[in-house]
Amino acid sequence: MWSYEKKLMYPVKVSTCNPTLAKYLMEQYGGADGELAAALRYLNQRYTIPDKVIGVLNDIGTEEFAHLEMIATMIYKLTKDATPDQLRAAGLAEHYVSHDSALFYNNAAGVPFTASYIQAKGDPIADLYEDIAAEEKARATYQWIIDQSDDPDLNDGLRFLREREIIHAQRFKEAVMLITEDREQKKVF
Amino acid sequence: MSQPNTPFRRYYLPFRGMFDPCPPIGPKVYVVPPNVLTGFQPPDYPQFPPLEALRKGTLWEPFFDYYESPYRK
């Protein structure tokens, strides 16, 4: 069960009318290394992972939905007042003809989300290594979006999200260490 | 190329061929984030004050890495 707090994890401010940025942000919304893929990946893997680290997957998976909500807010703010002409200029005409200005789980190139972006191998090491890789890929994606964006307020929010990816990767690495060490075992020499 | 003063950046120089069509981009920067260098978080790790931590995205000073585009002038 979840409880919902009706506020964003970090305030989202967008200071320039640049719908092209919305297109780039969709990579984090419905992309292979986006927040939706991350949330679904962790919350699904948590059932078949050693008890010690279920909580890590549970908490981080939940936080990813809070990130998804921030990305959604950014995209919405950037597109809600855009005319069809502006959306076409931003490369979003294909999105417009299918969705108007509704959000949809596409990546930046317009490819719709698919469950094959995520894995659940049932092997704790394989799954946690995948999670670490996913966090690093999401961190890199945030870097490339910041490289493309000249909106200082938007970048502020993106920097916050990028820092969270670093922390998540750290916690997943610690999870790997927790389940690989055998400190509790008595060694007889 | 302006770079923040941080231990979390590395550089490499891409191979330059004799007939490359474009002017060289120069050193390519890549990020080695703090989680790669740390291992298990040690006890008594230095912390940011709470309000600053909420803005930065982490409570832990050694895990903070500010990103700015290396291509930005």
Image (cartoon, grey):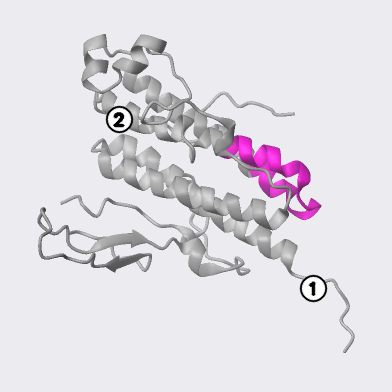
* 3D distance between C-alphas at marks 1 and 2: 49 Å
- Residue at image x 68%, y 65%? A177
Q: What percent of the width, then of the height, locates residue A50?
A: 78, 53
Q: Earlier in the sequence, mark 1 or mark 2?
A: 2
| A6 left or right, relative to B67 | right
Q: Quadrant of the N terminus of chain A?
A: top right
Up/down of A10 relative to B67, above or below:
above
Q: Nearer the viewer, residue A62 or B46?
A: A62
Image coordinates of residue A62 in percent, x first then y, are: 63, 36
Name above or below for residue A77 compared with residue A83: below
For numbered disc 2, what is the local secondary structure? helix
**Residue A186, image x, y percentages:** 88, 78
Residue A55 drawn in magenta = yes
Q: Which mark is residue A183?
A: 1
- Give the residue pinned by disc 2: A21
Residue A76 visible, this angle: yes
- Range covered by the magenta-colored residues: A38-59
Mark 1 lies on a secondary structure that is loop
Task: Judge by depth and name the residue closer to the eye, A61 or B20.
Answer: B20
Which residue is more in the foreground, A8 or A53?
A53
Quadrant of residue A152 within the rendered picture: top left
Viewer-proximal residue, A52 or A34? A34
- The kind of residue on which mark 1 rests is Arg
